[in-house]
Amino acid sequence: MPIYEYICKKCGNTFELIRFASDSDSDIECPKCGSEKVKRAVSLPAGSQKSCEGCSSSGSSCAT
Ligand SMILES: [Zn+2]
């Protein structure tokens, strides 16, 4: 199943959702503030998460 990362434009929160091809992005809400102003950031192939936990919060600054 595809996992997508979303970024809330209102509060900056990032979260991941499993979305099916038939699902629209229009009804996604930020789980933190409830805003619907979110954008899809990155698609994450299942099981390929990095082991470095510092990366996710600081963007692509990880040297790996
Ligand atoms: Zn938010």
Image (tube, grey):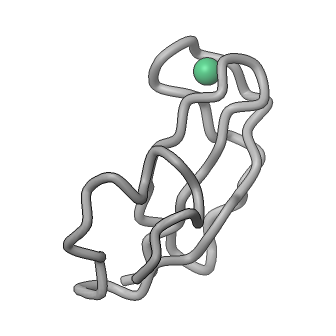
Quadrant of the rendered image containing residue 10: top right
Front one among 27 and 12: 12
Front one among 42 and 29: 42
Ligand 1 occupies quarter = top right
For residue 16, side relative to residue 22 (left or right)? left
Q: Is residue 32 above or below residue 50?
A: above
For residue 35, side relative to residue 14 (left or right)? right
Q: Is residue 56 above or below residue 29?
A: below
Can you give x and y, in whole percent of width and height, for residue 4 in the image? 53, 66
Can you give x and y, in whole percent of width and height, for residue 44 in the image? 46, 78
Quadrant for the C terminus, please: bottom left
Determine the residue positioned at 51% across, 74% down: 20
Determine the residue positioned at 29% across, 76% down: 50
Determine the residue positioned at 65% across, 28% down: 12
Report the number of numbered marks: 0
Front one among 51 and 9: 51
Can you give x and y, in whole percent of width and height, for residue 18 in the image? 41, 64
Front one among 26 and 4: 4
Quadrant for the N terminus, please: bottom left
Determine the residue positioned at 33% across, 52% down: 54
Can you give x and y, in whole percent of width and height, for residue 30 in the image? 57, 28
Q: Residue furthest front?
A: 63
